Amino acid sequence: MAKKQKTFRPKARVPRGFHDRLGSALTAERDMLARISAVYEAHGFDALETPAFEYTDALGKFLPDVDRPNAGVFSLTDDDEQWMSLRYDLTAPLARFVAENYDGLPKPFRRYQVGPVWRNEKPGPGRFRQFTQCDADTVGAPAPHADAEMCALFADVMEAAGIARGDYIIRLNDRRLLAGLMEIAGLAGVATEDEAQRMTVLRALDKLDRLGEDGVKLLLGPGRKDASGDFTEGAGLDAGQIDRVISFVTATAQTNAQTCARLREFFGPSETGLAGVQTLDEMTMQLAALGYKEDRIRIDLSIIRGLEYYTGPVFEADLTFEAKDDKGRPVRFGSVGGGGRYDGLVKRFKGVEVPAVGISVGVSRLLAALALKDNTAKVAAGPVVVLALEKDQMAAYQQMAAELRAAGLRAEVYLGGSNFAKQLKYADKRGAPLAIIQGEDERAKGEITIKDLVLGAALSKNIQDNKQWREGQPAQFTVKRAALVEAVKQTLPRKSQ
């Protein structure tokens, strides 16, 4: 007798570094993206959608993970043996789109884009391999005016997303200042080891906020051992070089004008550095005239930005408030987005420099920060559920739900059977604020019963026995069938209080 072959059943599991999302999480993201997109559109940006895949050579060398440049993207070969990769950001596809459609586009070209991106990086807590970006870019406009507008747009977006003024800061720097710093510190060589040393210096400066001045000095010099005992190799600068680097990064003053004055003195002979100072000075003066002063946009010389394609001003949106996690521990979110000027990205395709500047908003981090700040695990209210107690009355129940939907309310009919207890349990799992009940008795009287599930759950905590519950029934009431929509409308606002 032949042995029965075992049926293969795949294990239901999500790939590492990815996650499923349901209901309220998606609703919250959709609503935030709608508010941000409205700001972009109000500023004259048009929506653009590009494919998830790009040819790998179009993405270039600017991969997101500096330490793993050959593993930063998910790639495969097409049937013509050309390599394609899932986009790791929305900027590289924009550069390809502009180059491909250059002659037909208005210049400057202003677009915004919302969509998922994929990064083949090591996943960790809160660090996923797929996440949503929400970008706006202006291509074809030089600094400083387009950059000033982008900073103002960034501030407007933070507030549209729900971050109160005073709870965020747009931090501003210029990559030419960093290039000028390398000249002054004697680090402007062209050898491969010189470039490696410069990158080590930049990574050290990027940690100023977290490690402080002393920690950064160690990373600029011999290296640093962290609390776990792990050692990070330093840049190997001498004492004089370290002092020059530290004097630069700590030159941020109380006002943007004072910072620019300090920087002019610091850069003296460096034309590269002074060009960056001039741009920052013009930007901040323009922004101040529009009401975007240091409480919203501030020069911060520790802002580096990781991608190498930035050529001028760079900026980050930083959340300044502190929240607590579910265990009461303090959490500070820091950066929730960034951007800058990248005048060389389209040049890879066109052979000529095309000025460009943009921002990218980290929607997931913004949502997580707001949830912790409000100290709530907000769950979107479910639909009003119309119970289906009589099989032959299904058309009547569907009519009730249709009337509620026509009035702009979420509503559905239970379709899983006629058991009353199971229907109420379903409504509870759906997060329904109300259940609509019409059995034989109510129908004979031309009435319906509205059961307030939220109030009922709250009151049940204080009721001691079934007799007390039956006598009170404070969480449900009866109205005429014709008054369904009006009664539901009057009851629902209380659910959000």
Image: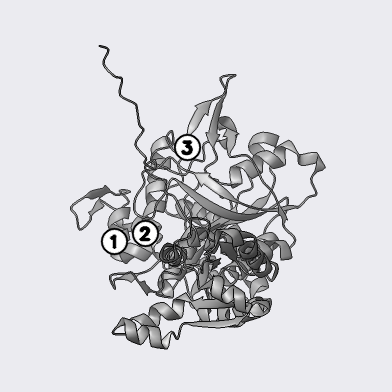
Say left or right for 316 vs 486: left
**Residue found farthest to the left:** 229
Q: Mark 2 = which residue?
A: 207
Instruction: In the rendered view, tell whether residue 285 sits above or below residue 354.
Output: below
Disc 2 crowd rating (10 Å Cα; few below 14, some 14-19, many 20+) is some
- Considering depth in this image, is 393 or 173 the residue closer to the camera? 393
Q: Secondary structure at mark 1?
A: helix
Residue drawn at point x = 78 percent, y = 50 percent: 107
| Residue 102: quadrant of the picture | top right
User: Which quadrant of the structure image shows residue 312?
Assistant: bottom right
Q: Is residue 146 left or right of residue 28?
A: right
For mark 1, does the 10 Å Cα neighbourhood hold few (<14), some (14 to 19), or many (20 or more) residues?
some
Q: Nearer the viewer, mark 2 or mark 3?
A: 3
**Residue depicted at 47% across the width and 38% down the height:** 190
- Where residue 79 sits in the image (x, y, percent)? 58, 20
Quadrant occupied by the N terminus: top left
Residue at 59 percent of width and 47 percent of height: 90
- List the residue tagged with mark 3: 73
Badge 3 marks a residue whose secondary structure is: loop
Q: Can residue 162 be seen from the camera position used here?
A: no
CB-based contact (under 8 Å), mark 2 and mark 1: yes
Mark carried by residue 215: 1
**Along the polypeptide, which appears first: circle 2 or circle 3?**
3
